Image (cartoon, rainbow, N blue to C red):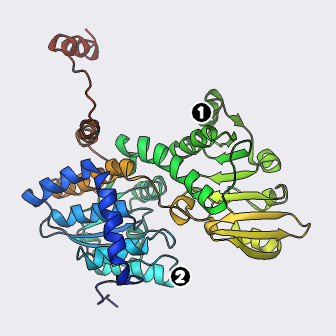
Amino acid sequence: MATTKKHDVKDLALSVEGVRRIEWADRQMPVLTAIRERFVKEQPLAGYRVSACLHVTTETANLARTLKAGGADVVLVASNPLSTQDDVAAALVDAYDISVFAIKGEDNDTYYSHIEAAVDHKPHLTMDDGADVIGVLHSARREQLGDIIAGTEETTTGVIRLKALEADGKLGFPVIAVNDAKTKHLFDNRYGTGQSTIDGIIRATNVLLAGRKFVVAGYGWCGRGVAMRAKGMGAHVIVTEVDPMRALEAVMDGFEVLTMDAAAEVGDIFVTATGDKSVIAAQHFDKLKDGAILANTGHFNVEIEIPALRQLAADTRLAREFVEEFTLADGRRVYLLADGRLVNLSAAEGHPAQVMDMSFANQALAAEYAVQHAAELERKVYPVPADIDNEIARLKLATMGIDIDQLTEEQAKYLASWDEGT
């Protein structure tokens, strides 16, 4: 049944605080602000419906405002049950007249009813953080696929899912892999995830990282960022990997590399950042030290095998907000943060606005590009065009007051001669 409600948020009375926080984030997002100002004049999205399934944060609010400024009819739903900031959701509805379906801590049924609300919007453009809306469209709403011009995807996990669909010949419309833009993953995934994951762990536990053995599962851009920041806080960082090249990089970056079996015996704090399932599994729980802390910064809460942990536990209790204590049969206690969900968004505020400025500039410009090039795009996963990526980098530097050198005409010709093999 189609959704008839215009919103579903916790409490519209939270709007005033939400507006203050959205405005604060906006001051740290000058690239997106510049795009919004242009969008107001040019209206590149006029007449298009956009369904966005993203983390409902202050930064996302400014993306939604930018899309609306460009003429889009926007519906925003949460891409994770614990990542919504309720005051932000209220402000978007009450102060900015944008439909939002998101409540922090919503149960599974409510979460998927909100995804349905995004689909009920009958979008021309989708924006995903984990491919949930695209997943519903490809499973239960295939009749709508032909109406969709394109989608965008924000996460590594989502891009993997979509490339698998493309490889099977089942992708129903073009998707732009925003996550793969250099101005997204080199900064958002590395510096954003690095800082916000450490922030989430510290807010949830108030533990000292210095001197702790800190295990990072996965050495992609997110894992690199977490390892870098944990090291900066004085932790002894251990990396686990399945990819030999990434494992070698971690060694050359100065980190100890172990198997998870070996790391489980010595680690104090564990963070998964792989996008895969059962990275920390039943056989590892048997080896954990008393007091081990488990957290996840990958998109889905499957990286830690939580059902197995619950089965092994003799008792559980809430030790602190977002900290669940599992007492095992032999008396060892293991602490799971934020139900294994994204710890940076569940227990903290997610990435800083300065880095999301580039990520969401990519989203806004990718939507504009999709509308402009709809007739040319095939049912494939596309990279963000290089000129958009480079323009965002140029704008970001300009807003930071940083000038860089320019090639002279002679230098440009010299480099071009090498490219041509002369």
Residue 151: tell me if it is visible.
no
The residue type indicated by label 1 comes to Met
Q: Which mark is residue 245?
A: 1
Residue 242: tell me if it is visible.
yes
Question: Height in image: 244 above or below 319?
Answer: above
Q: Where does the image place residue 233, in percent across and percent down from the top left?
A: 63, 41
Report helix, strand or loop for mark 1: helix
Residue under the image location 7 percent in, 57 percent down: 41
What count of labels does the image hold? Answer: 2
Q: Which mark is residue 107?
A: 2
Report helix, strand or loop for mark 2: loop
Q: Where does the image place residue 32, in percent across and percent down from the top left?
A: 25, 52
Q: For this rendering, which residue is in front, 376 or 50?
A: 50
Q: Where does the image place residue 296, in percent across and percent down from the top left?
A: 61, 58
For the C terminus, the quadrant is top left
Q: Mark 1, residues whose alpha carbon is within 10 Å: few (<14), some, or many (≥20)?
A: few
Displayed quadrant of residue 158: bottom left
Residue under the image location 65 percent in, 43 percent down: 242
